[in-house]
């Protein structure tokens, strides 16, 4: 097959999509799988699922932001009712998936590779599925700020997998090009394929809504060419929209990665640490586009998504699943075979084995694969790298994976960063082709987390140092201020005493009286005796210092007051 | 922890090495047809010795023995060393070569994947420095098989039945004042293009190498850059001074050239992995081969050229890092 890839790679430089007639740009690396395992589910219509015994609706909407709970335990809520208020720039609101009673607010297992729990509502449905009165968007279609706030209130987040808040993308407008991602490049997953086949017009409508909101001039819908029905459906839906172009792109994993799709369609390479909006491009998943349309037009918050149930199962297919549906209650839907030993969330290249099946479906949960040892055999033992270089040509970021592996293994994290470790998108292509069966991506994740840990340590140390230096500075300043205050006070006392002495002297001289005793002023036994006066001043200052020290000793340590 | 990807391509080091061994078979078959079965005895001896030395040292180093033996890398080194040596070298010399290649150049440096130098070439260089006479006697297609066996078993033998390589013959003659054109075709060492018999084995190396390239096991640019550079240099030299320099086809279809182009400089461990670096590596190796063949003291330059380029490999790699995705953008 070498000659074949050689021929196609040279042809790829002048690639034109036959569907749209658009020029396509070459992308680097990637893998064309022999079997994508999409046929298991791609031709089965999306179905609904039975209502579960409970919903676990997480308030933690993304790694950085957790919504603020606004409904008490025991309260009755209705479908679509807001139960979590968006917090922070990237936070989104959280809504009840059905009508029922809030039974608990606490830490529940989360659908995350770590398996760490997160704050969530436990909702017991009442079976009536009563919805609140919808509030569609009433503003202007190009009012970016209002649409941004509206989408935030509707809980819109990317349905492609990363669940990035949609309003935050909208906020980075204006851009030139809106890309709708229907590539769905990862094997097994067909939720976007089905959605495009069944709800093409809503996706196109959502794309137009988004384009108006972000002032985009063109809309490109990128779909891998292994989904001809989806392409046809989207083309039919886009026929009356002049600005929308449906583009069929070559099927190669990871062509649906955001950066890869942008490069394929526009030739723009978005570097690590930059947003695509800086280059005039924004990308939304097809599911997100439809959800935006439903929210704006019908006032529906983001409550459900399509989930692919596939793998070693007798009843695979795509399902409409509400956010918060416990995975354990979703699995029986696909009738898994007895040999299933674990469940993967996402595809086989970037997904993870679900650590706790009590965890719920989240906005980014696109696929559950019932994994059996026959479908996903345990990895063969790791062998030493022979530097065969098979990993480099498949890397979509043009990295040298074997060098990164070498540095990660040797804990030379600085060198790993020099060799652009953080440009790695963890697509897994290098590990897929490695003949020595090295879990390369694991090494990169390890190196990244070590570097982050060190950065944290460093910033912590820097903070401590800054705090310590500030404390020293503050103590110095306080000392100086105290000295200045004392000096001022001493000068004041001295001036007063002198004035007093002068006064009393004048008085004495004036009245000629003899009863001018120490009783008149204890601090001035002899106003004329300068030495005695000074001594009294010192004694008074000492007494004040003693009193102050005694007072400080009873107070908590000074550190806490900083 | 087992994390993504949960899928793997059906590839393994064993499979890679197996393809390399398979790609050597056409050359071995032709070698046996032209020169008789001595080569098979050498291959057998070298294979057994290589596995034994590897297993012993792995055991001494407390490393897993079975997984390292079954990757077939020791066999690849053994076969390449045997093919780099004249088929009629005494058995003890082959054995010594294996000990140097597997024991010193591979295991003492840390085993597979760790050796900075090509093990077969380290052994070849050590042997040609130590036993220049033995390594300069190459059998001819006319050499009787009985004589070859005698040579292999180490019995004292007569020089006249074996000969230097084509390039060695030419170099010696040119040094003694003869013109190349007078020599070509006048000696039994010459065939149609290059060495008698050996030129066809070179073609078999080419065929095996193309198979490896089609299977994606070796990058095409390494042999291409090597052969291109050597071809251009030898053509230029030949055009400028045809009486002093061999014609390009003698160089290109020399046995050692094709072996090096497809099986020696393509060793990934001691070579370069960056695409641009591979051009530099292969072209540099070809330049050194050309220089050593014409101006050096040894019969052939491949081993020294490859070892010198091995030395430069880390530096070449560092200087030829590809542009990362999104780099050089604002």
Image (spheres, coloured by chain):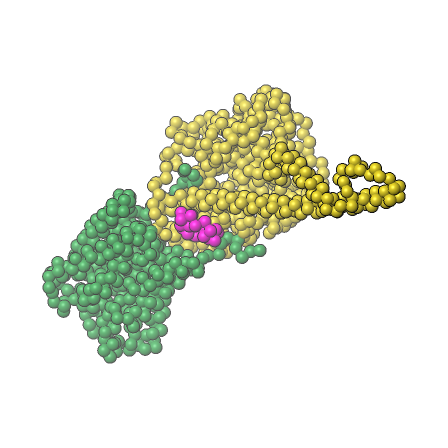
Chain colours: A yellow, B green
The residue that appears at 75% across and 47% down in the rendered structure is: A530
Among the 4 quarters of the image, the one containing residue A207: top right
Q: Is residue B102 magenta?
A: no
The spot of residue B222 in percent (x, y) is 36, 60
Q: Which residues are magenta?
A: A398-420
The spot of residue B237 in percent (x, y) is 34, 74
Among the 4 quarters of the image, the one containing residue A482: top right
Q: Is residue A404 magenta?
A: yes
Q: Image check: B201 left or right of B162?
A: right
Residue placed furthest toward the front:
A514
Count of picture labels: 0
The spot of residue B81 in percent (x, y) is 24, 57
Residue A26 higher or lower than A515, as above or below = below
Residue B289 higher or lower than B15, as above or below = below
Q: Image check: A526 left or right of A463?
A: right
**Residue A226 visible at all:** no
The spot of residue A111 in percent (x, y) is 50, 33
The residue that appears at 50% across and 53% down in the rendered structure is: B325
Pick whichever, A506 or A539, lies toward us: A506
Magenta stretch: dominant SS? Answer: helix
């Amino acid at each position: 097959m070498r000659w074949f890839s050689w021929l196609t790679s040279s042809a790829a430089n002048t690639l034109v999509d036959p569907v749209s007639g658009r020029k396509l740009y070459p992308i680097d690396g990637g893998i064309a799988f022999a079997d994508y395992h999409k046929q298991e589910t791609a031709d089965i219509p999306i179905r609904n699922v039975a209502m579960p015994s409970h919903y676990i609706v997480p308030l933690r909407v993304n790694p950085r932001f957790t919504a603020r709970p606004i409904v008490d335990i025991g309260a009755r809520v209705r479908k679509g009712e807001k139960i979590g208020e968006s917090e922070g720039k990237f936070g989104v609101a959280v809504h009840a998936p059905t009508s029922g009673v809030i039974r608990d607010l606490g830490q529940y297992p989360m659908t995350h590779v770590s398996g760490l729990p997160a704050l969530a509502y436990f909702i017991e449905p009442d079976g009536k599925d009563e919805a609140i009165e919808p509030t569609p968007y009433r503003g202007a279609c190009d009012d970016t700020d209002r649409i941004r706030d509206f989408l935030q209130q509707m809980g819109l987040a990317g349905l492609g997998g990363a669940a990035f808040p949609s309003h935050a993308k909208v906020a980075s407008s204006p851009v030139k090009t809106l890309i709708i991602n229907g590539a769905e490049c990862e094997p097994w997953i067909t939720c976007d394929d089905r959605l495009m086949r069944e709800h093409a017009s809503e996706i196109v409508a959502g794309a137009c809504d988004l384009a108006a909101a972000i002032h985009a001039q063109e809309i490109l819908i990128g779909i891998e060419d292994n989904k001809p029905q989806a392409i046809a459906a989207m083309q039919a839906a886009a026929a009356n929209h002049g600005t929308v172009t449906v583009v069929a792109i070559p099927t190669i994993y990871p062509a649906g990665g955001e950066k890869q799709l942008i490069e394929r369609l526009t030739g723009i390479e978005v570097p690590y640490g930059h947003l695509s909006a800086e280059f005039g491009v924004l990308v939304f998943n097809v599911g997100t586009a439809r959800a935006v349309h439903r929210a704006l037009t019908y006032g529906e918050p983001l409550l459900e998504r399509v989930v692919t149930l596939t793998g070693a199962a007798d009843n695979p297919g795509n399902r409409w699943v509400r956010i918060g549906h416990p995975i354990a209650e979703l699995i029986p839907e696909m009738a898994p075979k007895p040999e299933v030993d674990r469940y993967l969330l996402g595809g086989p290249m970037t997904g993870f084995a679900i650590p706790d099946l009590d965890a719920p479906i989240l906005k980014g949960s696109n696929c559950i694969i019932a994994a059996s040892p026959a479908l996903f055999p345990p990895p063969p033992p790791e062998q030493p790298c022979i530097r065969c270089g098979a990993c480099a040509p498949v890397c979509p970021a043009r990295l040298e994976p074997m060098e990164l592996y070498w540095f990660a293994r040797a804990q030379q994290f600085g060198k790993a960063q020099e060799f652009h470790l953080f440009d790695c998108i963890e697509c897994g292509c290098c590990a897929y082709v490695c003949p020595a069966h090295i879990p390369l991506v694991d090494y990169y994740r390890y190196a990244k987390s070590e570097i982050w840990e060190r950065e944290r340590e460093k910033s912590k140390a820097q903070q401590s140092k800054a705090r310590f230096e500030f404390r020293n500075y503050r103590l110095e300043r306080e000392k100086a201020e105290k000295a200045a205050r004392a000096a001022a006070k001493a000068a004041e006392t001295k001036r007063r005493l002198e004035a007093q002495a002068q006064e009393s002297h004048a008085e004495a001289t004036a009245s000629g009286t003899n009863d001018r005793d120490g009783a008149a002023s204890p601090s001035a036994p002899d106003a004329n005796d300068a030495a005695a006066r000074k001594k009294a001043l010192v004694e008074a200052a000492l007494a004040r210092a003693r009193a102050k020290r005694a007072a400080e000793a009873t107070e908590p340590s000074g550190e806490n007051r900083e | 922890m087992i994390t993504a990807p949960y899928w793997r391509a059906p590839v393994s080091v064993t499979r890679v090495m197996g393809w390399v061994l398979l790609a050597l078979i056409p050359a071995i078959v032709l070698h046996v047809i032209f020169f008789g079965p001595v080569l098979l005895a050498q291959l057998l001896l070298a294979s057994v010795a290589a596995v034994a030395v590897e297993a012993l040292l792995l055991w001494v180093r407390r490393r897993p023995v079975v997984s390292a033996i079954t990757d077939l890398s020791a066999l690849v080194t053994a076969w390449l060393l045997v093919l780099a040596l004249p088929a009629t070298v005494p058995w003890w010399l082959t054995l010594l070569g294996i000990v140097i290649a597997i024991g010193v150049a591979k295991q003492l440096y840390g085993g597979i994947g760790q050796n900075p130098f090509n093990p077969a070439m380290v052994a070849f260089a050590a042997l040609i420095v130590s036993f220049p006479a033995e390594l300069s006697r190459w059998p001819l297609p006319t050499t009787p098989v009985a004589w070859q066996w005698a040579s292999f078993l180490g019995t004292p033998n007569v020089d006249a039945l074996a000969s230097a390589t084509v390039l060695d013959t030419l170099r010696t003659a040119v040094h003694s004042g003869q013109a190349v054109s007078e020599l070509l075709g006048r000696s039994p060492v010459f065939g149609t293009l290059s060495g008698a018999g050996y030129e066809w084995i070179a073609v078999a190396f080419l065929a095996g190498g193309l198979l490896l390239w089609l299977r994606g096991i070796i990058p095409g640019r390494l042999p291409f850059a090597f052969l291109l550079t050597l071809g251009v240099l030898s053509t230029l030299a030949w055009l400028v001074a045809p009486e002093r320099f061999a014609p390009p086809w003698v160089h290109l279809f020399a046995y050692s050239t094709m072996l090096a182009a497809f099986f020696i400089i393509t060793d990934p461990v001691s070579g370069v992995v960056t695409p641009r670096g591979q051009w530099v590596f292969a072209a540099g190796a070809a330049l050194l081969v050309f220089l050593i063949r014409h101006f050096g003291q040894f019969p052939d330059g491949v081993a020294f050229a490859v070892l010198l380029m091995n030395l430069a490999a880390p530096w070449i790699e560092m200087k030829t890092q590809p542009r990362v995705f999104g780099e050089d953008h604002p």
